[in-house]
Amino acid sequence: MTPFHLHNKTILVTGASSGIGKQIAISICEMGGNVVITGRDEERLGETFAALKKNDGNLTITADLLDKDNLSDLVTKLPLLDGIVHCAGIVKPYPVKFLSEEKIFETFQTNYNIHVLLMAQITRQKKLNRNASIVFLSSISAAHPHKGGALYSGSKAAIESFSKVIALEFYSQGIRSNCISPAMVKTPMYEYAEKGASKETLDEHVNKYPLGVGTTSDISNTAVFLLSDASKWITGISITLDGGFLLGGI
Ligand SMILES: NC(=O)c1ccc[n+]([C@@H]2O[C@H](COP(=O)([O-])OP(=O)(O)OC[C@H]3O[C@@H](n4cnc5c(N)ncnc54)[C@H](OP(=O)(O)O)[C@@H]3O)[C@@H](O)[C@H]2O)c1
């Protein structure tokens, strides 16, 4: 059988109520896996659930991961997992002169702290099967920051570093940890960024992608690969998905 399938695997997907996380959950089920999907918005999470290929083991758990009780309840309810895709995230661009302690806290709480706390509780409660695969959603901005991106770029650089620590601390159980670092992908987060930029600025940016801006399936196909046994020799890395943007030739 092909090693790219996800049969007999149960995967937790955070941020599954929107954008990239939603498509990753759908793709996992299409490849034969079961998912536990979580997000804050119950209605949109329900829409994701309705879009999943009907596998018996799918579960939906609404949770605001900034709420300690919600996070603990989620972990308690989890079945044994063969993988996790950490998609929950926010983007709040600010020029450096407008940064404050509250703003730093806000971005790092969602883009870094909740993922670290989730991994701490999941591993403490022994919810990961041997050979599980962990995937974090980083961004090209971790290594290629942009103006206004102090918090977002910093939080993604931090999560890439954390992913490597997971790879080192859990390899003896065959557990792998990797990041996907996309450039711009068409999601509600992209639409939020669209509102904050002029049409000219955005057009100028989009025109620098030889293969165009990304779609959510471009990301979910790589997530499926990293969750599958086909990537069993890959750990501690970040895969850049950018449609050629970083070539910089355009
Ligand atoms: N779109 C891009 O261009 C792009 C590029 C590079 C990297 N990424 C990364 O990819 C990931 C997904 O991005 P996206 O574009 O799919 O964003 P999105 O459509 O805005 O979705 C963000 C998801 O995060 C969830 N979330 C946020 N705060 C949460 C919290 N406190 N507790 C639980 N869930 C929370 C949201 O839940 P609710 O909607 O239910 O509130 C939503 O499901 C993010 O980490 C992002 O940084 C995106």
Image (cartoon, rainbow, N blue to C red):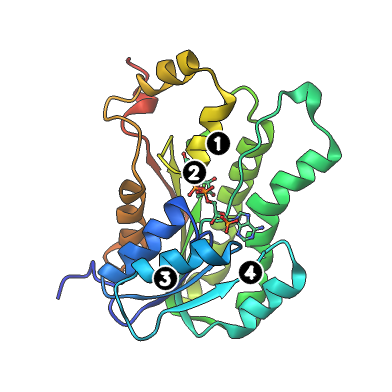
Point 41% across, 18% down: residue: 203
Q: Tag on residue 188?
A: 2
Question: Marks 2 and 1, how far apart in space?
Answer: 6 Å
- State the mark number for residue 192: 1
Amino acid type at circle 2 is Pro
Amino acid carrying label 1: it is Tyr
For the residues labelled 1 and 3, the Cα–Cα distance comes to 24 Å
Classify mark 1 as within 8 Å of ligand 1 or not, answering yes or no.
yes
Disc 2: residue Cβ within 8 A of ligand 1's nearest atom: yes
Residue occupying image coordinates x 54% and y 32%: 193
Q: Would you name the residue on which mark 4 appears?
A: 63
Q: CA distance from mark 1 to mark 4?
A: 22 Å
Q: Earlier in the sequence, mark 4 or mark 2?
A: 4
Give the quarter of the image for residue 97.
top right
Q: Which of pointers 4 and 3 lies earlier in the amino acid sequence? A: 3
Q: Is mark 3 within 8 Å of ligand 1?
A: no
Residue 186 is situated, as x and y percent measured from the top left of the image, at 40, 39
Tell me which residue sits at (39%, 65%) in the image. Answer: 25
149 to the left or right of 13: right
